[in-house]
Amino acid sequence: MNINEIRQQFPVLDQQVYGKPLVYLDNAATTQKPLCVIERERDYYLHENCNIHRGVHYLSQKATEAYEHARQTVADFIHAKEAKEIIFTRGTTESLNLLATSFEHLFFSETAYSKLSTDSQLSTLNSKLSAPKVLVTAMEHHSNLVPWQQMVQRHQGQLLVVPMDDKGLLDLEQYEKLLQEGPLVVSIAHISNVLGTINPVKQMVAVAHKYGIPVVIDGAQSIAHHPIDVQDLDCDFFVFSGHKMYAPMGIGGLYGKAEWLEKLPPYQFGGEMVDTVSFEKTTFNVLPYKFEAGTPNVGAALGLETAIQFIQSLDRNEVETRETQLLQTAIQQLSEIEGIRFIGQAEQRSGLVSFIIEGVHPYDLGTIIDKMGVAVRTGHHCAEPVMTRFGIPGTVRASFALYNTLEEVEIFVKAVKKAAMMLR
Ligand SMILES: Cc1ncc(COP(=O)(O)O)c(C=O)c1O
């Protein structure tokens, strides 16, 4: 794997900020986009732009074919059984809002509820609906917390939260106990965006299924770094964002097992998602269109397909090994700093390091190293409960992607050391 050739695919990396070469270590927030992705989107607007699914003319058919091809590519990438199990959304946040809203309509609107099949299913559900619960973990991003929280609170319910230890590992015994409290849904991060912990999601899915509870996996931080096989994980839903995997912003996905997607009512209403419409009654389109109301972001979906092809053109094992090496080097060199505290120390971890330094506010540190050309993220990373759990205001987070180098890690650590000296 020639890192220089890879970096040439990302012209944005080749620039100076404040007179220093840019070191971009904010990849968990968003990755940079390779030329092939940018060109694919540009090409679409130059030669193919058209609204899809509703035209008999050449361009419309071409755009429709390309869009559906992109759906198939996503399905293959995460090993979904069928392309209709992939819903294009704006990203992880929209996918999770879709699920929270649709589950709410499924369980709490009488018409949809009465469609649930057997009597025994109904009686189990009845007991769950008086004070509904959704099970999340202590390390969720706000996107995988607030939609569920709002949903259960509208029905006088509550979130159940799997606790974690000081290293950032989930308490799996407690997880199973909480499952026995009868949550309607389990929704868990595959990889924490603050701690880097890789959660044992396959095992967690299996345990939840023992209790007949569907599981959503938030794959925002995992899909770019690790091969995903939704059939092997046996998760009911898997959600992700394109912009965190070298694709454009404004596109992402929701995988759902067909049997669940068939059951769930639509999230938004309008064109495309309908079958027939009269003033009295509307019937809905088949999967996946039932969940894709209105004109989608076709250009970005094609960019996502190209991003997937770009990831697949590289040796994924080699990429993973390199990213692990960057992470370990960063941790090892940062450990030399007096008063450093790592937030998240799981053995199974990926892609990022979060820390605070005694006597130094993360925001000040981030601002100073920015002037040295180093881009990291500081703050609560949209996971305030994690900050509360560790009793800190925020962290400094460096996160890696396939184009980062050991040299950049060294520049970053030197910058942190210098800033810490200045601030203490
Ligand atoms: C674990 C996790 N979930 C959800 C999100 C939300 O993703 P988006 O803003 O792309 O919808 C993020 C973004 O940082 C994340 O890291």
Image (cartoon, rainbow, N blue to C red):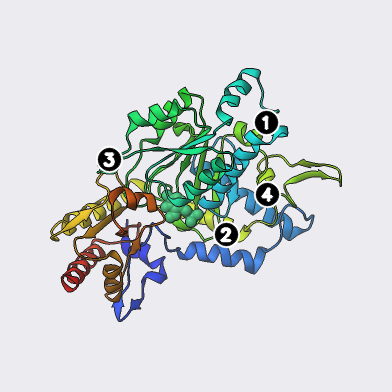
Whole-number angstrom distance, CA of label 1 to CA of label 2 = 35 Å
Whole-number angstrom distance, CA of label 4 to CA of label 2 = 20 Å
For disc 1, the marked residue is 113
* Quarter of image, res 369: bottom left
Give the quarter of the figure containing the C terminus: bottom left
Classify 46 as above or below 90: below
Whole-number angstrom distance, CA of label 3 to CA of label 4 = 39 Å
Q: Amino acid at mark 3?
A: Asp
Earlier sequence position, callout 1 versus callout 3: 1
For disc 2, the marked residue is 300
Q: Residue 118's x, y, as percent?
A: 65, 20
Q: Secondary structure at mark 1?
A: helix
Earlier sequence position, callout 4 versus callout 2: 4
Q: Which mark is residue 165?
A: 3
Classify 361 as above or below 207: below
* Foreground pick, 51 / 336: 336
Q: Amino acid at mark 2?
A: Ala
Residue farthest toward the top in the current orientation of the protein: 120
Residue at (45, 58) in percent of width and height? 246
Give the quarter of the figure containing the N terminus: bottom left
Q: Amino acid at mark 4?
A: Gln
Earlier sequence position, callout 4 versus callout 1: 1
